[in-house]
Amino acid sequence: MRGLIITTTGSAYRVLLDKGETIEAHVKGNFRVKGIRSTNPVAVGDYVQVETLPDGTNWITDIDERRNYIIRRSTNLSRESHILAANIDQVALIVTLHHPITSTTFIDRFLATAEAYRVPALLIFNKIDLLSSEQQQELDALRNLYESIGYSTLAISAIHLSEDNTPAHTLLNTIAQQLSGKVTLLSGNSGVGKSTILNALLGEQVTRTGKISDAHDKGMHTTTFSAMYPLRDPLSGWIIDTPGIKGFGAVQMEKEEISHYFRELFAVGRNCRYSNCLHTNEPGCAVYEAVIQNKIAMSRYESYLSLLGDVQESKYR
Ligand SMILES: Nc1nc2c(ncn2[C@@H]2O[C@H](COP(=O)(O)OP(=O)(O)O)[C@@H](O)[C@H]2O)c(=O)[nH]1
Ligand SMILES: [Mg+2]
Ligand SMILES: [Zn+2]
């Protein structure tokens, strides 16, 4: 039988079979996927083969080749990794400018990682009801910045999403349009409103919001629980929730390739004098020149330098 992994809890998996039925299945201890050293052999989003033994238990015997997969390294130096999800079409990062503050460094690192995975990213600014007029201007500036680089952005207030016949309800449709027909990984810092958005989109309380869920998240470090939820008719597609995981960890990057994952830096960097330019203080650096001329945002350049610094530092440890 073939099916899709829709929930993982560490030892057991829920599998949606092609014929529509959902079953629980297990993986043998010695099951390995070639070429990947991971703590979990199978992840949400994987298509697998399942066999039922005479005693009625179901076992995952094979896994279809993945289109892509997103990993988290257990620690920076560890070679062991944890697969968060497989076969995803896009990642949606939930961002708040207030309560809590999501830093531009966090946003940019997330976007760079998405670029490295070649997975399209969508930015959803939430809790806009809490913004002062000054913060509202900051929001507009950030949306303009990321749209100009080529990312889609939305600004919402998730707590108002499920109210019928309000502008917010129309907005829910707009979000749904961005998600329909796709497998979307939902991401963002704790407290930004992921569970609230998920519940509004799915029209039911699938995950707990607020304090309880935060406490819950913290206890989940060892047995990570991930799930994918189907969007409702007439929409198709899925949303993947990985509670307790902020982003999707660092991809192994070489210092020379980091600027490739900052789209506007990459575009300008072709004009640098040296082809291996790191855009720090080399003579004839077109990126540095563009920053001085405000053609590249200082916040983006600083994020680039901070990521570059991390990669260089980890090389010398
Ligand atoms: N004011 C306001 N509060 C929100 C909004 N969205 C979520 N919250 C609140 O923020 C808190 C954290 O939300 P939650 O969905 O649990 O965040 P998660 O940790 O990302 O899953 C809860 O108390 C929500 O009610 C919003 O648009 N506006
Ligand atoms: Mg949550
Ligand atoms: Zn340069």
Image: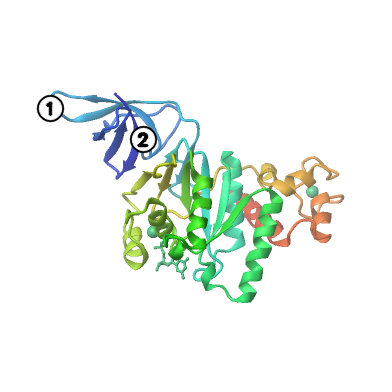
**Res 39 visible:** yes
Where disc 1 sits, the SS reads: loop
- Tell me which amino acid carries mark 2: Val
- Counting the numbered discs, the total is 2
Residue 59 at x, y = what percent? 25, 29
- Tell me which amino acid carries mark 1: Asp
Residue drawn 41% across the image and 44% down it: 231
Residue 50, placed above or below residue 93: above
Residue drawn 39% across the image and 45% down it: 232
Residue placed under numbered mark 1 in the picture: 55
Residue drawn 57% across the image and 50% down it: 122
Marks 1/2: CA–CA distance:
23 Å
**Res 317 visible:** no
Residue 172 at x, y = what percent? 48, 55
Dividing the picture into quarters, in which one does residue 300 lie? bottom right
Q: Nearer the viewer, residue 34 or 19?
A: 19
Where disc 2 sits, the SS reads: loop
Residue 201 at x, y = what percent? 42, 52
On the picture, is 298 further left or further right than 181? Answer: right
Residue drawn 44% across the image and 39% down it: 236
Give the number of the disc on residue 42.
2
Q: Nearer the viewer, residue 161 or 50?
A: 161
